[in-house]
Image (tube, rainbow, N blue to C red):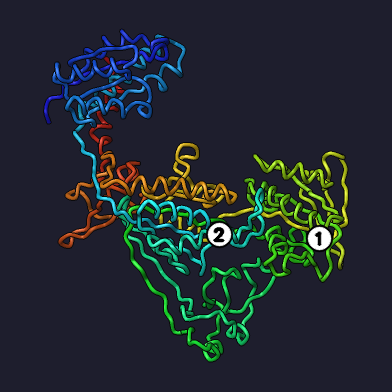
Amino acid sequence: MEQPRIGVYICHCGVNIAGTVNVREVVEYAKNLPNVVEAKDYVFMCSAPGQEIIREDIKKCQLNRVVVAACSPTMHEHTFRTVLAEAGLNPYLLEMANIREHCSWVHTDKVAATEKAKKLVEIAVAKASTLEPLEEIEFKVNENLLIVGGGVAGMTAALDSARRGFRVYLVEKKPILGGNTARLGRLAGTDMRGVDVAGSMIEYVKRNGMITTLTNTELVSVDGSVGNFKVTLLKKPTYVNEKCTKCGECVKVCPVEVPNEYEFGLTKRKAIYLPSPASYASTYVIDGENCTKCGECVKICPVNAINLEEESERIEIYVGAVIAACGYDPYEPSVGEYGYGLSNKVITLFQLNRLLDPEGPTNGELKIDGFVPRSIAFIMCVGSLNTTPNSYPYCSRMCCSSTLKDILLLKEKYPNIDVYVIYKDMRTYGRDEQLYLTACEKFVKFARFREAPKVSVTGESLEVTFFEETLGEEISIPVDLVVLAVGMKPPKDVEKIRTILKVGCGPEGFLKEAHLKLRPVEAVTDGVYLAGAVTGPKNVVESITSGSAAASKAVGLLCREKVRIEPTIASIREELCSGCGICVSVCPYGAIIIQIKENTRSAKVEPALCKGCGVCAASCPSGAAQQLKYKDIQLKAQILAATYKR
């Protein structure tokens, strides 16, 4: 390695640094450090004149290392790397000393702060002496896109990407697209029904030749890295082919009955069924988990559309990016929770939504045991804003608006019905506040609880008891029907998806964004994006918006011919590696594999998966794993400088 020639540049940052640190004293100190051939200061080193000082000195003084003592590297490391590159120097021969956040901003003693700044500069100079040139790593980008989840967020992302000319593989684990939105009736703030919104999107997806739809298909594995993912899928059989005319004869002879998930358990369906009553369900399908393979449907089918011997199919595809749009599951109250499961007069908001839908099980009529209820109590925040077991501490965002929307539909259809809304917090944000104001005008009664209400079920009678905060006393309300405004919870297969895609998970179980504010549709794994309610509760509009945002990010990646990643990643010295596999077990990103060459085991780093966290280097017993730009020799140099007294 050539003899280091280091230039040290210290920033005043206006008075942010110079107000506490004696910058001139630090400059004079730096001039006497080993391998330093130039040391200067400037009021704003990140400014154009400050950058020009560094550029000129690199050429004039033949510098081959640069130390900048300024603010956090997060702010301006990229700025100064660009300066080095423009001057013909490898950008990774830069070391920064943070004397603002780590020194001037956290100290008031000017003498002590100056001494600390000297030591921080000395440590940076010691490390700079050991730096090696590094080169960014390039990969070609596959232009295909995988979207996991066929709800409104996933379909929006698929349509937006396909319209920009990219091949899209849209994977949905259920037999039909549409997600939860396809089961919703009238949506809050609009006259449209959820099934209509989903249905129109499904038709657009079907007509788009750039979208390959794979329903009844699950994600098995995703290997590779950003720009080049190998995806394995498992397409499960539906046992019914495109010859099906939807005559319904098979349903008549099927002996199996199970709860109908489309109707949220309000009705039953057969093992062979139409996955949606809407027109876009093109064929019947057979539920493989509940079918007894009795063969009665095969015998009666007039067009021989049923094959009970059909098997699952493994499919491999190659894509450059992945969007996870797996949606949510409605919260399911446990038996006895607010009387749920003890009486058919205690239902969820999703079930009420189906009852009020003209295409629902009662054709839009709200009838319980054949009668229209005279009084209804809506209990809010069931399963949400609650720290009890099996509940969730967050707000599900859409429950309040959906409840008031359904109440206004009820009042329109049954003006004399008495409605009570028993709530913890009323959160009709944005335009949906109008729903609350209209409900008040319709004489809907609102009562606020402190502790969760109790629902007593006695024969055919229901009574809701709770402490009303405004009145300051406990009250009881007898009603004919109780509706539980349940919220959203993470989908049941979210842990499987998280593991396969190597993405983070929040404390509530939803997939975690790379940054809540700055990167809300990106996962920590490069090339993986998140859309819809898979990151947390969202209404239909918000899900569609995030689908478009995720598509925009993914397309931005796919548009590139090549993708570049920083070289500050892990590296394995094969001659020192024993192949023990400790690094494989501790790597949080699955970036290390064990390879066998000539009967010798050794670890290998997948550069595009590695995030440079350094866990492998810290755990390697032989020192074979090293973190580039943070090698043992570089860290030791810093430690020696930190402990050396001049």
| Residue type at tag 2 | Ala
Locate residue 441: give its quadrant: top right
Front-most of residues 419 and 462: 419
Task: Give left or right: position of 293 versus 31.
Answer: right
Where does the image place residue 546, in percent across and percent down from the top left?
A: 50, 47
| Residue at x-position 62% and y-position 62% | 183
- Please report the residue visible at 23 percent of the width from the left and 18 percent of the height from the top: 54
Q: Is residue 283 above or below residue 523?
A: below
Residue at the limit of the structure toward the bottom, as seen here: 299
Amino acid at the residue labelled 1: Leu
| The image quarter in which residue 88 lies | top left
Residue at mark 1: 481
Q: Residue at x 27, y 17 (%)?
A: 9
Q: Are marks 2 and 1 in contact (CB under 8 Å)?
A: no
Query: Is any part of residue 510 visible from this angle?
Result: no
Q: Residue 524: x, y in percent?
A: 41, 45
Image quadrant where residue 80 sits: top left
What separation in Å lies between label 2 and label 1 (alpha carbons)?
Answer: 30 Å
Element carrying mark 2: helix
The numbered disc on residue 198 is: 2
Which quarter of the figure is the N terminus placed in? Answer: top left
